[in-house]
Amino acid sequence: MSLWEYANPKKFLGLSGAVLPWVSAGAALCLVVGLVWGFFLTPDAARFQSTVKIIYLHVPAALMAINAWIMMLVASLIWIVRRHHVSALAAKAAAPVGMVMTVIALVTGAIWGQPMWGTWWAWDPRLTSFLILFLFYLGYIALWDAIDNPDTTADLTSILCLVGSVFAVLSRYAVLFWNQGLHQGASLSLDKEENVADVFYFPLLVCIAGFVLLFLALVLLRTRTEIRARRIKALLARERQA
């Protein structure tokens, strides 16, 4: 069985309909366990006090904001190369979800920054690239609504996605590219010395799993909606021609 078979809308709807309840249940379970564990069952940090608990929202949201754009990039490349409409619609479906994740990351970052840095906002390389990524999300969503021809829109949004991927990469690695800046290094790393303490690390992993599953569930749900909306438009167009 080839993966490309699920580029067929009918097969995609069948598979996603079977998977969606399980993914949604997994997201709900991980989010409830992770957030309750993180916010109520972990101690305050010696340096950051209770402010450290913002990581259970900020870190997963920031990761998904970046990875959502990367998913959109992959889907856009598939559209450009193979012209599979489901991939273009999946990219379209992911954009609002990624934008909300970016907003959550920016807001929780500001809540973290005010007591830690003494300011709600700083033109730090990572913060600035994240703000630009948010603007790219807005532009991407607006472009889908600006043009009537869906294939033309898919082509243009795919190009925009390619350009915006630069800022998705910068958002992830800005701390490594520039030594200056207020933003601290990664909370999760292959280097154990850079990780947060285990008491915070494990509930954080559960929260990240919850955000990943939530993103997947929302994208599946929205893609299904986009496929059905396109079918309705096609049927209406045929009725007008008849």
Image: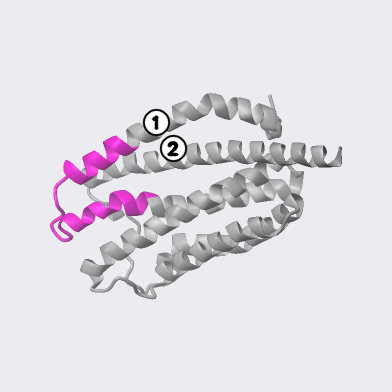
Q: Regarding mark 1 in the picture, which secondary structure is present there?
A: helix
Instruction: Tally the marks.
Output: 2
Residue 62 in which image quadrant = bottom left
| Horizontal side, residue 22 vs residue 190: left or right | right
| Horizontal side, residue 72 vs residue 191: left or right | right
**Contact, mark 2 vs mark 1 (Cβ under 8 Å):** yes
Q: Amino acid at mark 2?
A: Leu
Q: Is residue 127 magenta?
A: no
Magenta part of the chain? 31-60
Residue 161 in which image quadrant = bottom right
Magenta-colored segment: predominant secondary structure: helix
Is 50 situated above or below 217? below
Q: CA distance from mark 2 to mark 1?
A: 7 Å
At which x and y percent is residue 163? 62, 64
Residue appearing at x 49%, y 62% in the figure: 134
Is 134 situated above or below 192? below
Q: Compare residues 24 and 211 and report the one nearer the observer.
A: 24
Of all residues, the one furthest to the right in this rendering is: 242
Q: Which mark is residue 213?
A: 2
Q: Amino acid at mark 1?
A: Gly
| Horizontal side, residue 238 vs residue 211: left or right | right
Residue appearing at x 33%, y 32% in the figure: 29
Residue appearing at x 32%, y 59% in the figure: 108
Q: Regarding mark 2 in the picture, which secondary structure is present there?
A: helix
The residue singled out by tag 1 in the image is: 26
